[in-house]
Amino acid sequence: MTSGISDEVRELANQEYQFGFVTDIETDAAPRGISEDIIRLISAKKAEPDWLLQWRLRSYRHWLTMPEPTWQHVTYGPIEYQDIIYYAAPKPKPKLASMDEVDPELREMFGKLGISLAEQERLSGVAVDAIVDSVSVATTFKKKLADVGVIFCSFSEAVRTHPDLVRRYLGTVVPYKDNFFATLNSAVFTDGSFCYIPKGVRCPMELSTYFRINAADTGQFERTLIIAEEGASVSYLEGCTAPVRDKNQLHAAVVELIALDNAQIKYSTVQNWYPGDADGKGGVYNFVTKRGKAAGVNSKISWTQVETGSAITWKYPGVVLKGDNSVGEFYSVALTSRRQQADTGSKMVHLGKNTRSTIISKAISAGHGENTYRGLVEMRHSATGARNFTQCDSLLIGKQCGAHTFPYIEVKNPTGQVEHEASTSKIGEEQLLYCRQRGIPEEEAVSMIVNGFCREVFKMLPMEFAVEAQKLLTVSLEGSVG
Amino acid sequence: MLKIENLHASVDGKHILRGLNLQVNAGEVHAVMGPNGAGKSTLANVLIGREGYELTGTIEFQGQDLLAMSPEERAVAGVFLAFQHPVEIPGVGNMYFMRTALNSLRRARGLDELDGMDFLGLAQERMKLVEMDKSFMSRSVNEGFSGGEKKRNEILQMAILEPTLAILDETDSGLDIDALRVVASGVNALRTQDRAMLVITHHQRLLDYIVPDRIHVLTAGQIVRSGGKELAGELEEHGYGDIGAVGAGAVGAGT
């Protein structure tokens, strides 16, 4: 008689965080701590124009006056901001003539992560910008994108090559005074992706950024800016991993999206930062500000996220619906197991007429995981005929986890319509027994039920990401049964 | 094939099965009848390994100690239950669910898994047995199914998974006469020489359509009477009360 658990599931159950390796690359790092000197150093390393340095310094000075927020439903020890390394970069090699010259160790690292930087893999049809620690190391398919006028490069490069575009849009969606972590990012951000889709262009391939924290004791502060001009459209994917480390690492990113008239931006994230071990030691603090401005009429911004990593996740991707008839969407799966904590949700701010927003949030808690949905739906005076639909579902696996929901709704225009649905369920013993009675082993049954619970969100993800997301959930749920 | 000896089952200190004995041979269809609260569903639950019961006694299934096995191991051994109240699993496609189940069983038995196309062929053939429309397969497991659809879906799973021992728990409850006919004819089509069935029911109505080889009367946790199919008629005439009085365990029936 077999034990009833297949080898595959056993293997899965024994699988630890599989991206926890460290790559031995020579790193050029700044001294620990934050100060005006450090900021000048970062800016100088990147040969930035003076206006950007001044913007960073303004942010830093403002940050010094801000208290660290405490309202979120997560607990963690104090972050020693003077103990963080704010700039770390793989040591630059001589200027590259082609992608083949990327440091072999870096190439190998991305190979392990399942990301090919090789241009020959044209079939995959995804252009990748790879960011290690603080610096963009490679961007693929640049030439092909340039043919249709799409600019896709690292943020630092954009500052050099398209300073006017950067200056025009930087901080217009997330102002430097926005919040504690966004302000910190504005002062010390190191790199990120920049993407510009010109008028009327549908970006011919998925754009993707892959973030990797490699060096120890570094914070990662990337800044992403995506602009879709009138009638343009783009689908953008973001993936994240980090090595296993005992100490917590801070990741405070800012993402700004701007969609002009009739433009569409779809932004998908699969976040798998190191979550810490079973006792809650180590792991990434993922404190991120993501916001889109649906600035033009009929514009549309859509966030899809699958969050399985990080010790603490704290983010509320939102959309400011400024253009009339603009659309904002947020589809989220957040899984917390082990000792992970998540306080996440969305903000939809309706300004324009007949603006519409949808929020679908699926929270899964297992182990000692704590999962909080926090969402804001705001309809201003000007938002005549605005509509929102929000659905928050929580699924609990086991008895020691928790799920919480804090919806905030502010409607200042009497024609606004807001619908909110919420549910909390436990993985039913009935469902599990039903699956097991049919011969499906317990771990597999849990994964099947959870994936079913998330299906509404998964179907919004680009195909290959959806497959990855399902696998991630299965791995992250290991040992959460019983 | 199945041999139950002196089975006792309690839940939360409540003694439900009180020394139940039952033997079912391959190729036979046995009916277990009894009033509400006699322990019929408990028997089904214990057979598939639902947790939460304190058990004594033995259940031997094809030479194996059934009580020592997990629910999925029992499924691999060939035990199947058509649930009285099949549960809904939102977002999980019915077709996907059944293929996963079949392939889990096949994998555990050392057989090759069926690919999507082969499974589709099998499923379409078996769906005819219970007159199910193929639209059922793309819906989520039992979600939004009517009572009759759920029961038919159970029989379809039985047809696809081809168990050695099929237990049908109140499969007739909530069915109108037409649905009952469809379900019964599906079950009858699955009667074979090497398959045994245990039909648990409150009403003898089902036994007009699925004619058993043996009928057992379960009252207050014990089989108090066993006989051929003619016992159904007797029960209809006299009710469970009379028959229960004949047996030894006529204590406190009806909880």
Image (spheres, rainbow, N blue to C red):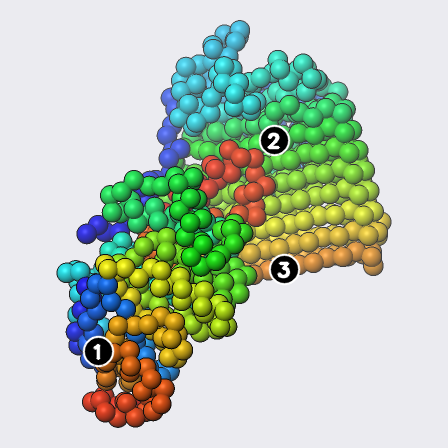
What element does badge 1 sit on? strand
**Residue located at (33% from left, 59% from top):** B190
Residue count near mark 1 (Cα–Cα under 10 Å), binned few <14, some 14–19, many ≥20: many
What element does badge 3 sit on? strand
Q: Is mark 1 in CB contact (under 8 Å) with mark 2?
A: no
**Residue located at (57% from left, 32% from top):** A237
In this picture, residue B40 sits left or right of residue A161: left
Q: Which residue is mark 2?
A: A236
What element does badge 2 sit on? strand
Q: Residue B7: where, in percent of width, then height?
A: 20, 75
Q: Please state the chain letter of the residue tagged with numbered disc 2 in the rendered image.
A: A
Q: Residue A286: where, in percent of width, then height?
A: 52, 40
* Observer-nearest of A168 and A451: A451
Same subunit: marks 3 and 2: yes
**Residue located at (53% from left, 35% from top):** A463
CA gap, disc 3 to disc 2? 29 Å
Identity, as a three-letter code, of the amino acid under mark 2: Tyr
CA gap, disc 1 to disc 2? 64 Å
Instruction: For residue B80, say whether it is visible.
Output: yes
From what the image shows, is residue B110 above or below residue A73?
A: above
Q: Which residue is mark 3?
A: A421
